[in-house]
Image (cartoon, grey):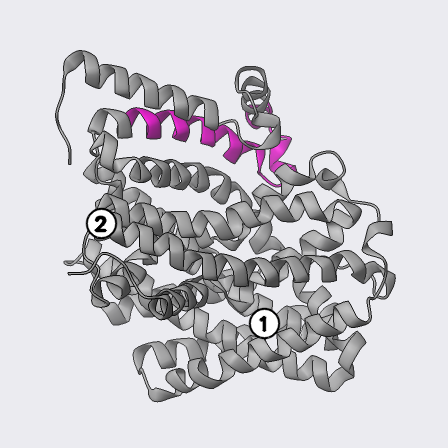
């Protein structure tokens, strides 16, 4: 048994981390952020990288340190019931409720939306998503070598084409990124807005779900101790952080400079398409659209498979794997037809609730060697964080719902009592309070109930 990996093995694991977290569907967020942040792009980008790149790597490290074999096992110290609910909520979020429908709509926004307009958009999205999810369910139920071929050839082709586009952006800028004024929340609080924008990638949630893939990969290379696996994950994670950081920062610059040559757009998919057309014309736009569509298809297949397998494990006496695949695909198809902007808008309240719980779980798991997965600490910390996150959930509702009297009263109450609530982080102080209450109770009662 060895304690550490060689440099080549670290690079291999780092590339695996990069492949796990980097997806075509996430390209739209740094581009959109850059266009909205304008000359405040730098602080916004730093915030985005913390939650969109650093936090997912920490999620894998935390899973390794805790010695957990799954997300359910990781959350079990709170309670078995909570572990089931949290696992279901997380998988549904990175699955058929938001992430999977988003793959289809991103492919549509980059590919077909620029060529259709007005009344053609909804029928176009319907037909495109129908074809997209028909292929998804076909390849999910009938695994074939074509998906290996896509991963082997089209993913590198996508990265090459993206690199060429980014080089063009820097070689011949569309405008001076420092001259465009920030929009919305980026005017007053760009760093904290960037932090919250990083939630949209959902990579921190995905890290908790798929950490076992990385951990198993390191174990197969001969490292077995949880602490050693965590250390090697950190070292290998630097590769992923470096690569994703460069790509996301370059995309943010692309968005920040884009108003000099193209019009502002509702989402990053349209911006990416217009920038591609600006530099390479319609052929380049079509090529990028085709590769993004295939990359998104591959992501959708992987997520449908993972969600179906997890629900089969959680509920072994329920329906079969094929039924879960069919149900999740139909649900994804239905939600996709609401459009990318609506999917993003409705995902924000859910993410504002789930992310504090996920971050809390990551931090508690990082402390597992010292707190020994004590129930009191896990329960009080998670409980306080969850209550505070509920107020963030209410505040993030789309505008029509924010005007409801009950929602208004809840938000106003939270603004009075929760430090940092206005920045979107009202859960942090309650979580720390819960941690110390749990720790004190453990010391007073001398409870030794590790899970």
Q: Is residue 336 visible?
A: no
| Rendered location of residue 347, percent (x, y) | 52, 49
Element at badge 1? Answer: helix
| Rendered location of residue 80, percent (x, y) | 19, 39
Q: Is residue 240 visible?
A: yes
Residue 294: mark in rendering:
none
| Residue 416 forms part of the magenta stretch | no
Relative vertical location of residue 385 with respect to residue 304 in this rendering, above or below: above
**Residue stretch rendered in magenta on the structure:** 379-408
| Rendered location of residue 40, percent (x, y) | 75, 44
Q: Measuring 51% from the left and 83% from the top, which residue is drawn there?
A: 154
Left or right for 435, reference 417 = left
Name the residue beneath numbered marker 1.
107
Number of numbered discs present?
A: 2
The reply to whether dot 1 and dot 2 touch (C-beta < 8 Å) is no
Left or right for 158, reference 315 = right
| Rendered location of residue 318, percent (x, y) | 19, 59
Q: Quadrant of residue 419?
A: top right
The disc, 1 or 2, on the residue closer to the chain's N-terminal end is 1
Q: Measuring 50% from the left and 66% from the top, which residue is drawn there?
A: 23
What distance separates the C-alpha of mark 1 from that of mark 2?
39 Å
Q: Give the residue furthest to the top.
A: 444
Please tell me how crowded label 1 is: few (under 14), some (14-19), or many (20+) other residues with Cα within 10 Å. Answer: many
Element at badge 2? Answer: helix
Name the residue beneath numbered marker 2.
226
Residue situated in front as seen by the camera: 14 or 37 = 14
Left or right for 86, reference 374 = right
Please tell me how crowded label 2 is: few (under 14), some (14-19), or many (20+) other residues with Cα within 10 Å. Answer: many
């Amino acid at each position: 048994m060895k304690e550490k990996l060689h440099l080549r093995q670290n690079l291999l694991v780092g590339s695996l981390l990069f492949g796990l977290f980097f997806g075509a569907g996430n390209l739209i967020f740094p581009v959109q952020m850059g266009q909205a942040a304008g000359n405040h792009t730098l602080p916004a980008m730093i915030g985005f990288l913390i939650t969109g790149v650093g936090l997912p790597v920490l999620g894998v490290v935390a899973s390794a340190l805790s010695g957990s074999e799954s997300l359910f096992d990781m959350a079990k110290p709170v309670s078995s019931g909570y572990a089931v609910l949290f696992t279901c909520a997380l998988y549904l979020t990175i699955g058929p409720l938001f992430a999977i429908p988003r793959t289809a709509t991103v492919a549509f926004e980059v590919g077909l939306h620029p060529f259709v307009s007005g009344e053609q958009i909804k029928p176009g999205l319907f037909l495109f998503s129908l074809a997209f999810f028909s292929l998804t369910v076909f390849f999910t139920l009938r695994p074939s070598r074509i998906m290996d071929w896509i991963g082997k050839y089209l993913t590198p082709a996508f990265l090459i084409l993206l690199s060429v586009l980014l080089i063009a952006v820097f070689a011949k800028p569309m405008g001076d990124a420092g001259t465009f004024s920030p929009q919305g929340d980026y005017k007053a609080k760009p760093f904290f807005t960037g932090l919250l924008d990083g939630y949209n990638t959902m990579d921190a949630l995905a890290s908790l779900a798929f950490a076992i893939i990385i951990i198993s990969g390191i174990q197969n290379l001969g490292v077995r101790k949880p602490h050693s696996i965590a250390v090697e994950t950190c070292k290998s994670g630097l590769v992923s952080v470096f690569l994703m950081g460069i790509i996301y920062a370059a995309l943010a610059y692309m968005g920040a400079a884009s108003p000099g040559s193209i019009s502002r757009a509702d989402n990053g998919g349209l911006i990416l398409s217009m920038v591609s057309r600006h530099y390479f014309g319609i052929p380049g736009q079509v090529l990028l659209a085709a590769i993004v569509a295939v990359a998104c298809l591959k992501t959708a297949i992987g997520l449908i498979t993972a969600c179906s397998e997890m629900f089969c494990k959680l509920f072994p006496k329920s329906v079969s794997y094929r039924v879960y695949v069919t149900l999740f695909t139909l649900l994804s198809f239905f939600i996709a037809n609401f459009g990318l902007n609506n999917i993003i808008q409705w995902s924000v309240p859910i993410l504002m609730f789930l992310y504090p719980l996920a971050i809390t779980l990551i931090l508690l798991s990082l402390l597992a060697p010292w707190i020994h997965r004590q129930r009191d600490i896990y329960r009080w910390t998670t409980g306080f964080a969850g209550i505070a996150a509920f107020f963030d959930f209410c505040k993030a509702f789309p505008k029509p719902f924010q005007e409801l009297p009950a929602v208004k009263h809840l938000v106003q109450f939270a603004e009075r009592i929760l430090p940092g609530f206005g920045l979107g982080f009202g859960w942090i102080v309650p979580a720390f309070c819960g941690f110390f209450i749990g720790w004190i109770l453990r010391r007073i009662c001398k409870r030794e109930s590790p899970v």
